[in-house]
Image (tube, helix red, strand yellow):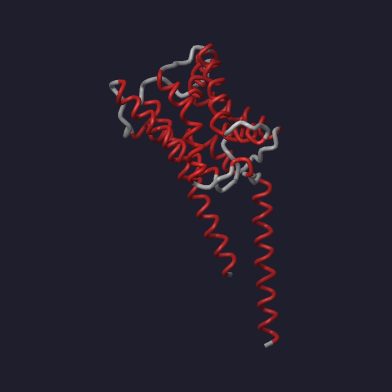
Amino acid sequence: EGGGLKNMNRIIRVISRLLLGFIVYGLAIVVMIHANIGLSPWDVLHQGLSLKTGFTMGQISIGVGIIIIIIDAFMGEGIGFATLGNVLLIGTFLDIFENLNIVPYANNLFMGIIMMIIGIVLAAIATVLYLKPALGSGPRDGLMLAINKRSTKSVGTIRAIIEISALTLGWILGGSVGIGTIISGLGLGYAIEIGFKISHIESKSLIHQSIYETIKSFDKTKEENKNREVETCADVDKE
């Protein structure tokens, strides 16, 4: 019984951490959009593709996320519950914050830069929150970590290369680029790197549990608790 309760508390803690990460990331995106000084690199790509295809930015974001998940799987990154949550929930919380209308729009460049930096810090905190349980990275983070494990480059450098590539393609397709794009493109990877160091996360040794592995580990824990209960009952009978 004690083992089951302990396991339930752990599950609640992990789910709470993941949800908090997705909520904070949704808020971070809204703050960066409202900075009004240029979209972040991935959003430049999403907007560019949206303009060319007629799909909404949200639909494009989900579609791009699914394509990257497939690439991650081929590169050996586990597709976990957090991966699916990233694709489905961050956009949902983004819409909620937009509808609540609680984040003001920057009306000058200085305020825009401050808001962009706040957005980057929030995004880095959110990334650390949902990566630490190792239940699957976000599709874009998975790509960053998969390449990191196969190269000598730092997480920050790899993130910057990926984001600049997405930005270039988005700009060619007609996405909106500004000074905020440069700040977020170069700053987010290094902010995440600092977050990893503060939280003592070693990116190269971070092995994410796939959905199958997570379910398997829950079944194993249930079996162990059942065996423990049987052993306890046997001891009572002996007495």
Indicate the position of residue 2 as horizontal and vertical percent values: 57, 69
- Residue at the front extreme? 152
Q: Where, by quadrant of the figure, is residue 202 drawn?
A: top right
User: Which residue is found at the position 59% from the left and 41% from the top?
Assistant: 203
The tally of labels here is: 0
Image quadrant where one finds the N terminus: bottom right
Indicate the position of residue 175 as horizontal and vertical percent values: 48, 15
Q: Where, by quadrant of the figure, is residue 24 drawn?
A: top left
User: Closer to the camera, 106 or 189?
Assistant: 189
User: Which residue is found at the position 62% from the left and 42% from the top?
Assistant: 80
Q: Is residue 168 left or right of residue 32?
A: right
User: Closer to the camera, 106 or 83?
Assistant: 106
User: Which residue is found at the position 48% from the left and 39% from the top?
Assistant: 194
Indicate the position of residue 125 as horizontal and vertical percent values: 45, 41
Indicate the position of residue 222 as horizontal and vertical percent values: 65, 62
Q: In this view, does 180 lie to the left or right of 60?
A: left
- Residue at the left extreme? 107
Q: Is residue 98 left or right of residue 41?
A: left
Image quadrant where one finds the C terminus: bottom right
User: Which residue is found at the position 68% from the left and 65% from the top?
Assistant: 224
Q: Where, by quadrant of the figure, is residue 156 drawn?
A: top right
